Amino acid sequence: MTAVVAAAGVLLSAGCSGGDKSGTPSWQSGAEAAAANAPAPASPQPTLSTVAVTFPAKDATGVKAIAEIKYSSEDPANTAVEVKDAAGKKVEGTLDTDEKVFRPAEALGWGKKYTVTVTGTASADRGATATSSFTVMKKPSKLVRAVSHLGDGQTVGVGMPLIIRLDRAVPKKYRADVQRRMQVTATPAQEGIWHWTSGQEVHYRPKVYWKPQTKVSYRVQLKGVPMGDGWYGRTDYTVNVKIGRSFVMTVDNKSKHMIVKQNGKVVKKLPVSLGKPGFHTVSGTMLVTDKLRKTTFNTIGRFTGPDAYNTEVEYAQRLTWGGQFIHAARWSEGSQGRTNVSHGCINVSHGGGKWLYENTMIGDPVTITGTEERIQYGDGWTDWSLSWEEYKKGSAI
């Protein structure tokens, strides 16, 4: 039985191997044979999306710390960009698919190497990957510090501008880039703008006074920002402040009284005495910039004679750098509300000065009208002495 099976196997094998030398079985027609010998069709290949890192260049060195990653893609809406440092830590940021730019959330590290991977995701038969590396410039020796006048968590008056001071003047052609790196968010939202008071100081104010209880957050991202002549910003930080109640003081020289409104309602009316001839109080809108429970005013080194003085005062609140204050003045209480006898300050009674001191805060506005002189811009926080159209001209953008 075993031998028969083996033989049958041989016969079967021989029957299947018959035909011509081409190897085509004798029972197939010519057309069938051609079809049988045709190569199998290839699997469909995806159309590759053209992706590439276009900036920084591959293996670039000395790249600015604020560099934005640029890429190309035929399908940007379905393209991902990932940036990692040498340790594999992912760089957080935002991807702008319209401009094909990845913007890091923070400045990149001085002297660090980064790898960029651009991936066209598998969508509509597209997909590709491009990788490139670059190295950030070494930490420069010339760095500019930017300091916020307001501290995190501080509560201020409705007139208070945000103030950033730099320890070196920024040339005009670099100010727009600096300004773009200072972002302000107000809740509720309010229209506002940055204004350069000088090359070393930038203020931000809203179009009208801040709404009471507004929450303001401003982010200063100047690390690595070029500031001219080989100088770069060194500072990145965020400050959160709160706007308090509305507390607005108005002084009228004609009536010689101060009207105080809190949240729109009159809460106090105080008689005042302003500057006598030769010592005029300036008109305009000023802000409380400083508060001194007790201090000494004097004219030592400035002038002598019957108008010279060296006097201790209480409840003093500075309005101008030139020395205009609101303060208590017992010695002029008989003249307050009637005639001007001060050296330029706003004299109020001892009780009135105490009440104001206890109820005001930095950034509360004071508007004075009807005097012979107008406040000079820059003599104090004079942001509100300019119209909105004038103020906008101070923006670098």
Image (spheres, grey):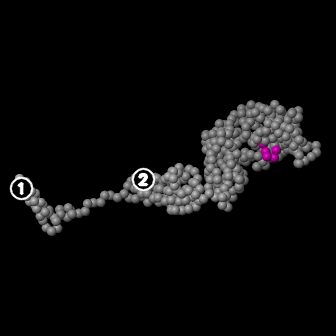
Residue 110 image-quadrant placement:
bottom right
Q: Nearer the viewer, residue 372 or 143?
A: 143
Rendered residue at 16%/64% (across/down)? 24
**Looking at the image, which residue sits at the far right?**
305
Q: Secondary structure at mark 1?
A: helix
Q: Which residue is mark 2?
A: 121
Left or right of residue 159: residue 17: left
Main structural element of the magenta stretch: helix, strand or loop? loop
Q: Position of residue 34 (x, y in %)?
A: 20, 64
Location of the C terminus (image quadrant): bottom right
Q: Amino acid at mark 2?
A: Thr
Q: Position of residue 211 (x, y in %)?
A: 66, 38
Q: Which residue is mark 1?
A: 4
Q: Position of residue 21 (x, y in %)?
A: 15, 68
Q: Nearer the viewer, residue 208 or 255?
A: 208
Rendered residue at 9%/57% (across/down)? 6
State which region is magenta: 319-323
Is label 2 in contact with label 1 (beta carbons under 8 Å)?
no
Task: Classify 153 as above or below 195.
Answer: above
Task: Classify 141 as above or below 319.
Answer: below
